[in-house]
Image (tube, rainbow, N blue to C red):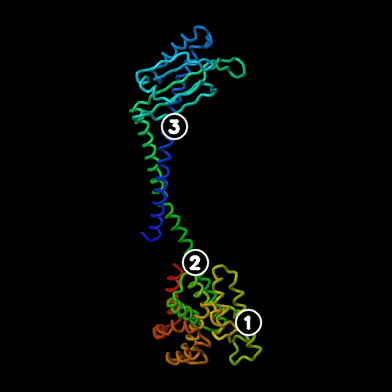
Amino acid sequence: MNSFNKRTAVRISAVSLLLAIVASPIAWFVARENAEESTVALAMEESRRLLRHFDAIALSEPDAREHASQAAETITGGLFDIAEVYDRDGNKLAESMTQDGQIIEPLLPKHGRPQYSEASYESLKLERGRWILRVFVPLQERSDTQGAARITGYFEGVRVVSEWQHQQMLDDALSAALMAGLASLLCGGAIYPVVVRLSAENEQKAHEVLDSHISMMEALGRAIAKRDSDTGAHNYRVAWIAARIAERLGMRDKVMQSLIAGSFLHDVGKIGIPDAILLKPGKLDADEFDTMRTHVQQGEEIVTGIGWLDGASAVVAGHHEKWDGSGYPRRLSGQDIPLAARVFAVADVFDALCSKRPYKEPMGLDSAMEILEKDTGSHFDPEVMAAFRPIAQEVFDRLAGCDEDATRQLLEVKVRSHFGI
């Protein structure tokens, strides 16, 4: 399992566990409330059986107390342990209790005369863990019209929820909580392979896009080299040398990627220089040199605005700047020069000195380093030279005798390492 899959597994597991921790109590609470409300609904429905005893009898009639007593006794022992019937003025007409009802009746909170118009209930926890449900139902006359029915009395019932029923409700709620928690964990387990697969596909596509970008960078570099009558090996060498120096300076990720791309395309602006000047065998005059210098600005214009190449502009625009400010085109100095351009300047001059050109033979390491040391503090950043100095011999030996294919392979290793492909 790679690091991404491990991180994904840990994060999905954490989220699933968090969901289980949150969802389980909620499911437990909702299930318990639903069970309680179902019990109450059943109790209220049972209480409405009273209405059948009063279809033709008003609670204010002389014999209403007798009928109320019969109704209370009828309903007690079913769902209710205490049944009370009141007239419309809140006067108690009848009361009936079971044995359990007689035990809990003294423990119930007292209240005044009933005057409610809507059915309701309350859940109470009494001493010794006794749980009761108390319902309040207004008794109304049946109406054949659209008008509201007139309240003729009130029914109040108390149900003692047995321990086994209470435990069953809690067990059902616990089962619902466990199911919700398990569902959350299973959901996380089901999502993980989907996320990993989508990530792998996305990574593959990203690699393909990045690979095409690098291929385009190489094609553009070769076009520049052909334009300048070069083999193109110089671009590979300077990009590799710059990457080696940058690694010692701690450069990485996008900064390193920008350095490699900028080093490879540092002379992209030469595409816009006329052949008569670019390919002139002799020394350029002042006007021609001014024209040649414009390759920096033209190169910057080419790479700027091309998303993945935007970072390359630091090297393209600043590879002819010097530490003391005597370079061009902006005459930047010191830390004002982008670090990538300062790194490239050392790599570029070192490669130019140590490589064979049509107009010169390659220099040895000692001679090349002597020139670099002489220009440190004027042309080159002393800190960059301090990073390059310990690896100069290794770099020189590694590039000695390398043709274009060999240097391309060297750079490819750095590209795959720092571009993540």
Q: Position of residue 414 (x, y in %)?
A: 43, 74
Is the C-beta separation of discs 2 and 1 under 8 Å? no
How many residues crowd mark 1 within 10 Å: few (<14), some (14–19), many (20+)? Answer: some
- In primary-sequence order, the first of circles 2 and 3 is 3
Q: Amino acid at mark 1?
A: Thr
Instruction: Judge by depth and name the residue closer to the eye, 201 or 222.
Output: 201
Query: Residues under labels 3 and 1: Cα distance?
Result: 80 Å
Q: Amino acid at mark 3?
A: Asn
Say above or below: 112 vs 5.
Answer: above
Name the quarter where the N terminus is drawn.
bottom left
Q: Which residue is mark 2?
A: 210
Q: Position of residue 16 (x, y in %)?
A: 41, 48
Query: Residues under labels 2 and 1: Cα distance?
Result: 30 Å
Q: Amino acid at mark 2?
A: Leu
Say above or below: 110 vs 181.
Answer: above
Q: Which residue is mark 1?
A: 294
Instruction: Judge by depth and name the residue closer to the eye, 243 or 39.
Output: 39
Query: In terms of secondary structure, where does tag 1 sit?
Result: helix
- In primary-sequence order, the first of circles 3 and 1 is 3
